[in-house]
């Protein structure tokens, strides 16, 4: 971890996982359906909690949810869900765990309709990262008209735990929007 680099304000004081996540993932475009499903699950899991909590449990999530194999997760039964709710390696919130299983099933439906979840979700930004130019982290919105539209459409399609703030965080995580501040080394090297 190079502490001499200028990073987005939210990373300061974070642990090594924060730095790693910021430096290598946050804002990098993701187009793999399983990875998109992972981010969607983690962003929903984070609701009401710190991102550090989620990052610390990320490997537990990967193990517990079969490396985010969408087909397998969509087939989880009540027994499997009960075992997940007893798993200390994930956030054991019944609504969030159930939402993950439900959302996997909805993604399978979208793969049939659109060819991939990627094709559907990236259509909200016309397949291109929105390059924002925020000076300060407090300028970065928690939601936008675009995340409102995404949330509304996903809910209409049966997705759960998918509010507009979760959608915007998902868009940031998967590189649909680049919200690194203009002074951040990541913005300077990736723009």
Image (cartoon, rainbow, N blue to C red):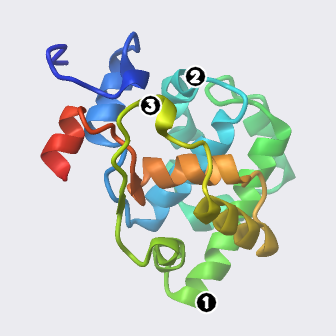
Q: Quadrant of residue 71?
A: bottom right
Q: Which callout, 3 or 2, points to the residue nearer the camera?
A: 3
Give the side of residue 129 with respect to residue 142, left or right: left
Q: Which class describes the residues within 10 Å of circle 1: few (<14), some (14-19), or many (20+)?
A: few
Badge 3 density bin: few <14, some 14–19, many ≥20, Cα 10 Å:
some
Lower sequence index among marks 1 and 3: 1
For marks 1 and 2 on the same chain, the one whose residue lies earlier in the sequence: 2
The residue that label 2 is drawn on is: 53
Which quarter of the rendering shows the N terminus?
top left
Asked if residue 147 is positioned above or below residue 82 in the image, the reply reads: below
**Residue 158 sits in quarter:** bottom right
Disc sitting over residue 137 in the figure: 3
Nearest to the observer: residue 171 or residue 136: 136
The residue furthest top is 13
What residue sits 50% from the left and 30% below the top? 138
**Mark 2 falls on what kind of element?**
helix
Q: Which residue is mark 1?
A: 113
Residue 17 location (% of width, % of height) = 37, 23
Q: In the image, residue 130 lies at what x, y percent? A: 38, 62
Quick check: 51 above or below 146?
Answer: above
**Residue 16: percent from the left, percent from the top?**
33, 17
Residue 53 quadrant? top right
What SS does tag 3 mark? helix
Q: Is residue 59 visible?
A: no
On screen, residue 97 above or below 131: above
Judge whether residue 150 can be spotted in this image.
yes
């Amino acid at each position: 971890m190079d502490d001499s680099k200028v990073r987005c304000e939210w990373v300061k004081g974070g642990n090594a996982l924060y730095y790693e996540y910021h430096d290598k993932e946050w804002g990098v475009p993701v187009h793999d359906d399983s990875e998109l499903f992972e981010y969607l699950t983690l962003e929903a899991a984070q609701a009401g909690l710190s991102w550090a909590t989620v990052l610390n449990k990320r490997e537990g999530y990967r193990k517990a949810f079969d490396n985010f194999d969408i087909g397998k997760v969509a087939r989880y039964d009540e027994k499997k869900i009960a075992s997940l709710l007893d798993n200390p390696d994930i956030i054991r919130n019944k609504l969030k765990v159930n939402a993950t299983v439900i959302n996997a099933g909805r993604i399978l439906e979208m793969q049939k309709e659109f060819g991939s979840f990627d094709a559907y979700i990236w259509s909200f930004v016309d397949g291109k990262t929105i390059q924002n130019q925020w000076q300060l982290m407090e300028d970065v919105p928690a939601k936008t008209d675009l995340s409102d539209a995404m949330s509304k459409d996903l809910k209409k399609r049966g997705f759960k735990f998918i509010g507009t703030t979760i959608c915007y965080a998902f868009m940031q995580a998967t590189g649909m929007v680049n919200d690194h501040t203009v002074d951040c080394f990541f913005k300077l090297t990736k723009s």
